[in-house]
Image (spheres, rainbow, N blue to C red):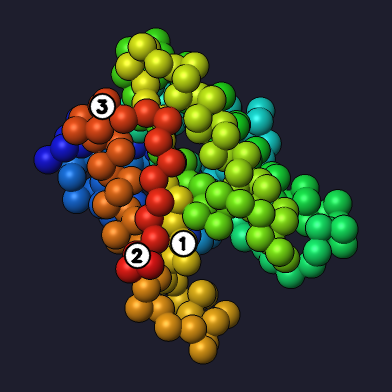
Amino acid sequence: MRFTDKTVVVTGAAGNLGQAVAAAFAAEGAQLILVDVDAARLDEVYPGSSARRGKLAVDLRDEAATAAALAEVLPDGRACDVLCAIAGGFHMGEAVHETSAEVWDLMLGLNAQTLLNAVKALVPGMVAQGQGRVVTVGAAAARSGVAGMGAYTATKSVVMRLTEAMAGELAGKGVTVNAVLPSIIDTPQNRAAMPKADPANWVAPADLASVVTFLASAEARAVSGALVPVTGGR
C-alpha cells in the first residue's frame, strides 16, 4: 500500500469530496487527520474512534486557531507527509458589480484563506523533514471568468496561483504542490440543485480522489505545479 506509515491531513473531511479522499487514503494504509469546521458532522461521518485516524474541528479561516490545533495533533516536532486541502465553498448568482462584501469575504475565506492557513501550519514541517505533498482543489471553471460566478472563480483562481507559487518556492526541497481542477462533482447536493442536468459526464468523488492520491504518491514525485483538469467525460 502506497501510504503505509504516512500521515495525511485532509481538510474539509466531512464533505463529499473530503470523505472520498479520506476513504482512498485509508484504503492505502494512511494515518489520517480529518479536519472540518463542524465537530458534530465529523462525528456523524466518522463515528467512534480509530487508531488510524484523528478528528479535528477547527475553523481554518482562523490562522492562530489552525496553527494551534494542528500543532496539538502533530506533537513532538513531527510533520505530516501529505496535506489534501479540500476545504472550500461555492457561490453563484449575482453579477460582479452586485457582489456584496459578505459574499466576497465568504468565498475568499473558504477557498483561499483556509488553504493559506493550512500550509502555513504544515509546510514548514514538510520542508524540515525533506519531503511532503500538498494537493489543492481549484476548479475547471476558474481557468477563466464566468458570468454570475465572479467571486467563486476569482477565489479558486487564487488557489491555483498559490499552488503554482508554492511549487516554485519549494522546488528542490522534496515538497511537491499540485492542484486538481474538477468540473461538476457528482454529489447529492448538485443533483438536487440541477435536477434537469445529465450527471453522466460529471466527476464521481471517488474518481477525483484517485487523482488526488496519485499526486500525493511517490509515483508523482516529478510532478509539481501542475493544474490537473478532472472533467469526467467532457
Q: Which corner quadrant holds the N terminus?
A: top left
Residue closer to the observer: 75 or 86? 86
Q: Secondary structure at mark 3?
A: loop
Q: Secondary structure at mark 1?
A: loop
Q: Residue furthest left?
A: 1
Give the alpha-carbon distance from disc 3 to disc 2, as whole Å: 24 Å
Give the alpha-carbon distance from disc 1 to disc 3, as whole Å: 25 Å
Residue 96 at what x, y percent from top left?
81, 58
How packed mark 3 is, by other alpha carbons closer than 10 Å (few <14, some 14-19, many 20 or more), is some
Residue positioned 51% across, 89% down in the render:
196
Tell me if label 1 and label 2 are in contact, CB under 8 Å. yes
Residue 76 at what x, y percent from top left?
39, 15
Q: Amino acid at mark 1?
A: Ser
Residue 108 at what x, y percent from top left?
70, 45
Q: Amino acid at mark 2?
A: Gly
* Residue at numbered disc 2: 232
Mark linked to residue 221: 3
Residue 50 at what x, y percent from top left?
28, 48
Q: Earlier in the sequence, mark 1 or mark 2?
A: 1
* Residue at numbered disc 1: 183
Residue positioned 27% across, 52% down in the render:
210
Give the alpha-carbon distance from disc 1 to disc 2, as whole Å: 8 Å
Q: Earlier in the sequence, mark 3 or mark 2?
A: 3
How packed mark 1 is, by other alpha carbons closer than 10 Å (few <14, some 14-19, many 20 or more), is some
Residue closer to the observer: 20 or 111? 111
